[in-house]
Image: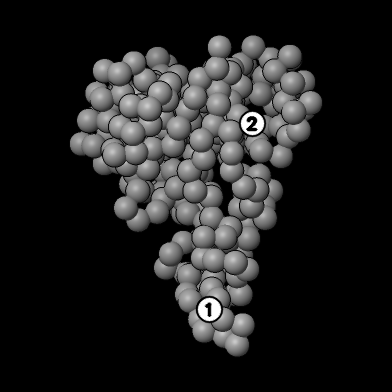
């Protein structure tokens, strides 16, 4: 059986996804604990609770993405986010950082853990390691794998496998987003946003209106290189 898991950047998006047949949604809090930390997106504790009630009433699941990497000075924020997910009643949390997985498994053993695409597990050996060490029950595969490689993974693990149904490939090693970090100092893996708005500027040139990412010429539009929400399919 296949599940359709859709991105929910806010409560209206969550309701639209659920009302139109999504089996579940994934979402994040309004901070850098998730990799879509853009202004006007995501959930606070109040809207998270409302979204969970709405989804569950319709038979849909809510997955919370905590898929950035905590830093020593701010580790408490990520721990608090795991605690919030557990107390709010989400169906699973999507994690990339092994230390955060260890915290979640120790502190909230009942909480279902999914391995994020940010974890860059491209082989069944890596996925089975996370299963054996941290008890993950689903892994989201990087978009760089071919269908044959995906089939090889599925045939060699009992962990549920989730795939992106659509979405672009960024100039990056999957899950590391180095280009944005180099250009503007904000790594999507810690700040939560690629090409953040504060670093993007429009500039009139002889070729027309172009964008600059912290002064660095950017091809296309200001959205080029960002990683917006992607629909995906879990098996």
Horizontal and vertical percent position of residue 95: 50, 33
Q: Name the side, left or right, on which 6 lies relative to 156.
A: left
From the image, state whether disc 2 or disc 1 is nearer to you: 1
Answer with mark 2 or mark 1, whichever residue precedes in sequence.
2
Residue 74 in the image: above or below residue 225: above
**At x 38% / y 37%, what residue is drawn?**
8
- Residue named by callout 1: 209
Could you classify mark 2 by the number of other residues whose Cα lies within 10 Å: few (under 14), some (14-19), or many (20 or more)?
A: many
Residue 122 in the image: above or below residue 161: below
Give the spatial CA distance, label 2 vs label 1: 37 Å
Horizontal and vertical percent position of residue 179: 63, 60
Could you classify mark 1 by the number of other residues whose Cα lies within 10 Å: few (under 14), some (14-19), or many (20 or more)?
A: few
Number of numbered tags placed on the structure image: 2
The quadrant the N terminus occupies is top right
Indicate the quadrant where residue 14 lies. Answer: top left
Residue 177 in the image: above or below residue 54: below
- Residue named by callout 2: 141
Q: Visible in this render: residue 199?
A: yes
Horizontal and vertical percent position of residue 74: 40, 48
């Amino acid at each position: 059986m296949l599940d359709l898991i859709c991105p929910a950047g806010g409560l209206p998006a969550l309701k639209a996804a659920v009302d139109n047949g999504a089996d579940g949604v994934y979402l994040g809090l309004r901070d850098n604990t998730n990799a879509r930390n853009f202004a006007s997106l995501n959930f606070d504790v109040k809207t998270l609770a409302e979204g969970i009630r709405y989804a569950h009433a319709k038979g849909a699941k809510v997955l919370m993405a905590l898929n950035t990497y905590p830093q020593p000075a701010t580790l408490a924020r990520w721990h608090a986010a795991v605690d919030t997910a557990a107390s709010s009643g989400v169906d699973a949390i999507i994690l990339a950082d092994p230390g955060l997985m260890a915290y979640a498994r120790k502190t909230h053993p009942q909480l279902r853990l999914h391995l994020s695409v940010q974890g860059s597990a491209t082989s069944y050996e890596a996925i089975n390691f996370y299963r054996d060490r941290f008890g993950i029950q689903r892994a989201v595969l990087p978009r760089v794998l071919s269908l044959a490689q995906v089939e090889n993974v599925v045939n060699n693990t009992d962990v549920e496998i989730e795939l992106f149904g659509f979405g672009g490939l960024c100039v990056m090693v999957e899950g590391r987003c180095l280009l944005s970090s180099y250009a503007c100092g904000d790594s999507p893996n810690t700040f939560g946003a690629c090409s953040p708005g504060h670093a993007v500027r429009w500039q009139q040139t002889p070729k027309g209106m172009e964008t600059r990412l912290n002064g660095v010429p950017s091809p296309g539009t200001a959205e080029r290189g960002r990683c917006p929400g992607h629909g995906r399919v879990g098996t």
